Amino acid sequence: MTESSDLRARGVKWPALELRQFRLSPYNEKVRWALDALGAPHLRRSLLPGPHLPVVRRLTGQTATPILRIDKNWIAGSAAILDALAQLSGAAWLHRGKDEAGQRARTIEARFDDDWVPRIRRAVLASALGDPGFMASQFAAGRPALGRALYRAILPLARERIRQGNGIRTQADVTDGEQAIGEALDFVSANLGPDGYLGGPRFGRLDLVVASHLAAVANPPDSPMSRPEPMPEATRAMLERWHDHPGSAWVREVYARHRGAKTDFEGMSERMR
Ligand SMILES: N[C@@H](CCC(=O)N[C@@H](CS)C(=O)NCC(=O)O)C(=O)O
């Protein structure tokens, strides 16, 4: 059972919202999950890593996704986007206060956003970069067959750029990424409260953030972060290595109880149709 209906922001007059995103990406998952949980009517458009560069740069002056348009203004940065959605919706569960709990939540979210996840991403990406078919099925899912085939064809050319862009220089970067997975999963196990959540007695922003960020490692089934099959052997080995860690089990549990959406989508959200 999902409890996402409890998280809906009822009676909110939403401005026009448009998300430009990557499909299998932790920062993008953070924002999609918040939009879904709030029931926020929005347009969602997926970009392909590589070809996204001129589009995102033109709209925001930088290249990282997710980006969200609120009426006429585009904003970047998943934490800033969640703050904006908290303000627009008035949803207390998404809000980070100035009190001690709010400061703790900021510190933890920043640790994931700025340290663990960029490192983890190196290990995750490195395990799959040698398999353009898999990369295309992760990022170009939902596109016509021709679009997927074209993306698959250009990926080997873009591989070195993706490695550089993500800081994958040597095997030591990949090993460091594996180390970061262990640190982040241990953090989860060590910081769960008596009710099984990270920020209090109920599901809240911190749980959404941390579960989104570790979904690429825990591979929650039937979710927008489920890996397509078949996956490369190196990716499977990485997932298996961490599968039984209690932090990984927690991510799957939180997805099963709170994620709601089983798949990603393109175009108008349910509440717009
Ligand atoms: N601090 C940013 C990081 C976002 C980020 O690293 N996005 C990646 C996808 S996981 C991206 O779009 N990379 C492509 C690029 O930077 O050009 C956030 O919180 O949104």
Image: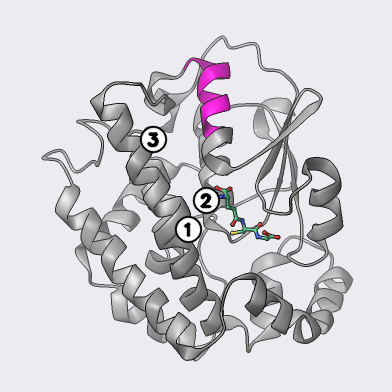
Q: Amino acid at mark 2?
A: Lys
Q: Is disc 3 placed on a helix, strand or loop?
A: helix
| Residue span colored magenta | 82-90
Q: Where's residue 80, x and y in %?
A: 56, 34
**Residue at coordinates 83% horizontally, 78% vertically from top-left?**
149
Q: Quadrant of residue 203?
A: top left
**Residue 93, magenta (yes or no):** no
Ligand 1 rendered quadrant: bottom right
Q: Is disc 1 placed on a helix, strand or loop?
A: loop
Instruction: Estimate the spatial distance between the alpha carbons at disc 2 and disc 1, rounded to whole Å.
Output: 5 Å
Q: Where's residue 254, x and y in %?
A: 33, 48
Q: Where's residue 214, x and y in %?
A: 40, 59
* Of the image marks 1 and 3, the number of the one nearer the N terminus: 3
Q: Quadrant of residue 146?
A: bottom right
User: Are dots 3 and 2 in contact, CB under 8 Å?
Assistant: no
Q: Amino acid at mark 1?
A: Asp
In depth, the one of 254 and 188 nearer the eye is 188
**Residue under pointer 3:** 205
**Residue under pointer 2:** 262
Looking at the picture, the colour scheme in use is: one colour
Q: Is residue 117 left or right of residue 187?
A: right
Quadrant including the N terminus: top left
Q: Where's residue 218, x and y in %?
A: 37, 65
* Of the image marks 3 and 2, the number of the one nearer the N terminus: 3
User: Is the CB–ligand 1 distance for label 3 below 8 Å?
Assistant: no
Quadrant including the C terminus: top right
**Residue at coordinates 33% horizontally, 45% vertically from top-left?**
108
Camera-side mark, 3 or 2:
3
Q: Is residue 124 left or right of residue 130?
A: left
Q: Amino acid at mark 3?
A: Arg
Instruction: Judge whether 89 appears above or below 155 on screen.
Output: above
